[in-house]
Image (tube, rainbow, N blue to C red):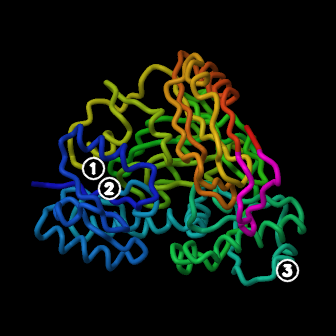
């Protein structure tokens, strides 16, 4: 029996979507997780505890496991397992991306070096130690600039600075995040450095694709209509299909293809973030995994196939009937967190669900839990999904549903240094 090894940390949003896709395909799954599962002893063929921070050791554990329970494909649900997936698949002789290519894509500085050497437009960048004096660094920085971590995702720790004073504050704020014990352990040597890069103006888009022997098959191109100008870069709305003129869409695809080729990525899902201005498209990020959070729920292919099922079919060598996205326009809003505190109440969900075009509203932080906004935070309040005849209607539905929601956030009882927060309740 050939199994799918699905790598996921306990913090992932993606577990249920991938497991449901595997169930639909009747594919036996081995869950490779960073923590031991409660039922692991009762199902030794279905669970594998792995140290994602030491991929060499984890690869050895996977190889030993595969001697008893054959594995046909290794898929990572998120960024955290991407390098491990490539390493394990390589040792097992399974189709995979080159490990060096995945490592380059996961390290933002290395990615910038590779893209610059290949002539792919991307921000100019400099690597800076977290121990450097920010005012000294500011003397050699061209403003506006962006400071960012080398390895964190979902815009965590990404801050724009327009002058030396803002830079010093942004640098200290980011280094405080990187010095947190759990972040330092996750990043290892990467947590000891900060990337400083030029700010690229323009509109932002996201491309979702699938690689087949290095050939990019575009699954969706998302507009991001909410301006992302900083100082923080909390994403809100994704809408597809894109409303950009066809020549600009073609230029975005071509730029992504150039980036994929430069990095050496060959197969599996790819998610790219780009900026578009008068000089054309620029690569901000490119990752060998699918879109994050619950955003994939906005995508359906062929006869209602999910993005995760498409990825698993490709990985397992099963037939993929169609990569064509459904005809309706679709979109998702990642509900932002307005301030730090304790989520006390959510109102207006019924009213929001009755907005024309709204498919689903998913609040992902339970009432009573702490909420932390960017740049320190790692989660959204939830997700709103919409479908309608046109992208404009989808975008309007998402904003209207959001207006119907009220989130009451009380000040935290224990202030978290660097997070801030107001002394009053907040609603959005």
Image location (x, y in percent) of residue 239: 58, 31
Relative to residue 295, is residue 118 depicted above or below?
A: below
Q: Are discs 2 and 1 less than 8 Å apart at CB?
A: yes
Residue 400, percent from left and from top: 67, 24
Query: Left or right of 139: which side holds 256?
Result: left
Residue 75 numbered mark, or none: 2
Q: In this figure, which residue is indicated by the disc labeled 3?
A: 136
Give the class, few, some or many, for how many residues have Cα within 10 Å of label 1's Cα (few <14, many ≥20).
Answer: many
Mark 1 and mark 3 in contact (Cβ < 8 Å)? no
Q: Secondary structure at mark 1?
A: helix
| Segment tinted magenta in the rendering | 409-425
Residue at the image point whose x is 68% and y is 69% from the top: 195
Q: Residue at x 63, y 80 (%)?
A: 192
Asked which secondary structure carries label 2, the reply is strand
Q: Earlier in the sequence, mark 2 or mark 1?
A: 2
Quarter containing the N terminus: bottom left
Is 357 or 275 nearer to us in this picture? 357
Q: Is residue 129 left or right of residue 88?
A: right
Q: Please state the horizontal and vertical placement of residue 77, each as a whole percent of the image.
A: 39, 54
């Amino acid at each position: 029996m050939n199994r799918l090894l699905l790598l996921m940390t306990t913090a992932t949003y993606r577990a249920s979507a991938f497991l449901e896709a595997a169930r639909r395909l009747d594919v036996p799954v081995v869950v490779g997780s960073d923590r031991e599962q409660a039922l692991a002893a009762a199902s030794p063929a279905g669970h594998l505890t792995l140290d994602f921070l030491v991929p060499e050791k984890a690869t050895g554990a996977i190889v030993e496991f595969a001697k008893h329970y054959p594995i046909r494909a290794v898929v990572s649900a998120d960024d955290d397992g991407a390098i491990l997936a490539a390493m394990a698949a390589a040792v097992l002789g399974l189709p995979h991306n080159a490990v060096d290519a995945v490592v380059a894509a996961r390290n933002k500085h290395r990615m910038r070096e590779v893209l610059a050497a290949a002539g792919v437009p991307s921000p100019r960048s400099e690597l800076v130690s977290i121990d450097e004096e920010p005012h000294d660094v500011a003397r050699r920085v061209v403003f506006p600039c962006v400071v960012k971590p080398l390895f964190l995702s979902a815009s965590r720790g990404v801050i724009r600075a327009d002058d030396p004073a803002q830079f010093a504050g942004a640098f200290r704020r980011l280094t405080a995040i990187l010095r947190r014990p759990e972040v330092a352990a996750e990043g290892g040597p990467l947590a000891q450095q900060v990337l400083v890069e030029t700010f690229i103006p323009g509109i932002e888009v996201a491309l979702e694709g699938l690689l087949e022997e290095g050939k990019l098959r575009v699954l969706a191109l998302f507009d991001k209509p909410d301006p992302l100008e900083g100082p923080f870069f909390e994403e809100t709305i994704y809408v597809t299909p894109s409303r950009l003129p066809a020549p600009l869409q073609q230029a975005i695809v071509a730029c992504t293809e150039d980036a994929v080729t430069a990095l050496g990525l060959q197969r599996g899902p790819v998610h790219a973030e780009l900026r578009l201005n008068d000089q054309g498209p620029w690569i901000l990020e490119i990752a060998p995994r699918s879109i994050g959070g619950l955003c994939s729920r906005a995508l359906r292919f062929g006869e209602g196939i999910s993005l995760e099922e498409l990825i698993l079919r490709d990985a397992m060598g099963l037939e993929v009937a169609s990569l064509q996205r459904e005809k309706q326009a679709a979109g998702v809003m990642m509900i932002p967190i307005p301030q730090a505190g304790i989520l006390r109440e959510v109102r207006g969900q019924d009213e929001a669900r009755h907005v024309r075009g709204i498919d689903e509203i998913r609040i992902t932080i339970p009432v009573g839990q702490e909420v932390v906004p960017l740049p320190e935070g790692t989660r959204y309040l939830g997700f709103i999904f919409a479908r309608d005849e046109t992208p404009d209607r989808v975008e309007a539905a998402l904003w209207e549903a959001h207006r119907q929601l009220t989130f009451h956030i009380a000040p935290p009882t224990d202030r978290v240094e660097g997070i801030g927060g107001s002394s009053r309740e907040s609603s959005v």
